[in-house]
Image (tube, rainbow, N blue to C red):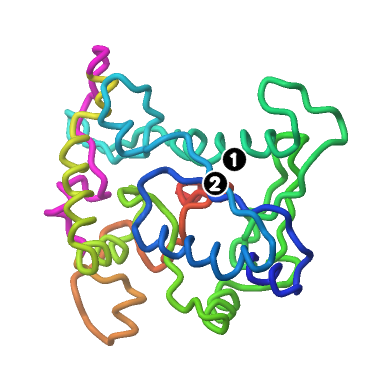
Amino acid sequence: MLILAAQGHLPKIEYALFSDTGWEPRSVYAHLDRLEREVAAPAGIKVFRVSSGNIRRDALDPDHRFASMPLFIKNPDGGDGMTRRQCTGEYKIKPLKAKVRELLGYPYPARIPAGVFVEQWIGISRDEFHRAKDADVRYMRNRFPLLDLDLTREDCLRLLAENGFPDTPKSSCLGCPFHSDRQWRQIRDQSPEEWADVVSFDAAIRAGSARANATGSPLLGSAYLHRSRLPLDQAPIDRLSRAERRGQQLDLLPLADADEDDEPGGCSPWACRGDAA
């Protein structure tokens, strides 16, 4: 959307907002730097990076209230569970709304007059049209330019490649429990330092958030980042999805119940992958 607006294929936008959880892959930050430098700045589009804090650091800080990630839980009786997902609201949506209020000139708790609003563009393609929803506040009105242009995900990838961005990374926390096995493998095989980081975090959250344990509300069970409910460095991430096996004409290990044919996109504030789950 930013490229199309900068080139005049979409109306000129005033601002672009990036909601930073503080724990994105280095490739995402490098990509954002390049977008800002090569696309937004020449077009006169201001990019704001907004944040509610560092989600990794907050999860391990016993003195900080933590909005829980959707961790996979192995219960004492052997049953499976998941913790509630609060991270999208706290670390993505909250700072975006705060910045929108500021740009409108009515920072919280000021009341925004009726009829004062921003038009907010959200990059949902035709493949996920069902995720296009109205905003839940009157001062934001959602628009979906990719749907207006009838663009699919493949169309978007083609446009990115044609404009010099063939390797656009997916934006999501390094330790997002909704990663596919393919994404876990990419971190492990392409970025050893970041892999060590997520393996360390996975071990550190085995008993739940540090805050909950410090206040006498320990997790009933054990928490994991991987759906197998095994330590991340022991999880079966090397099994290929059916789609990958078809592409490589291999007959490998069968998948677990969670089919990975649908390789999820990045983490959007307005279309979290967890919503489908």
Residue at 25 percent across and 49 percent down: it is 226
Q: Is residue 238 left or right of residue 143?
A: left
Residue 177 placed where, x, y %? 33, 48
The overriding secondary structure of the stretch rendered in magenta is: loop
Q: CA distance from mark 1 to mark 2?
A: 9 Å
Q: Which residues are magenta?
A: 214-237
Relative to 277, does residue 36 appear above or below in the rendering?
Answer: below
Q: Is residue 169 left or right of residue 74?
A: right
Query: Which residue is the site of mark 1?
Result: 96
Residue at 59 percent across and 61 percent down: it is 128
* Amino acid marked by disc 1: Leu
Residue 156 placed where, x, y %? 58, 74
Relative to 40, does residue 105 appear above or below in the rendering?
Answer: above
* Amino acid marked by disc 2: Pro
Query: Which residue is the site of mark 2?
Result: 269
Q: Is residue 132 left or right of residue 52?
A: right
Q: Is residue 203 found inside the magenta-colored segment of the image?
A: no
| Label 1 or label 2, whichever comes before in sequence order | 1
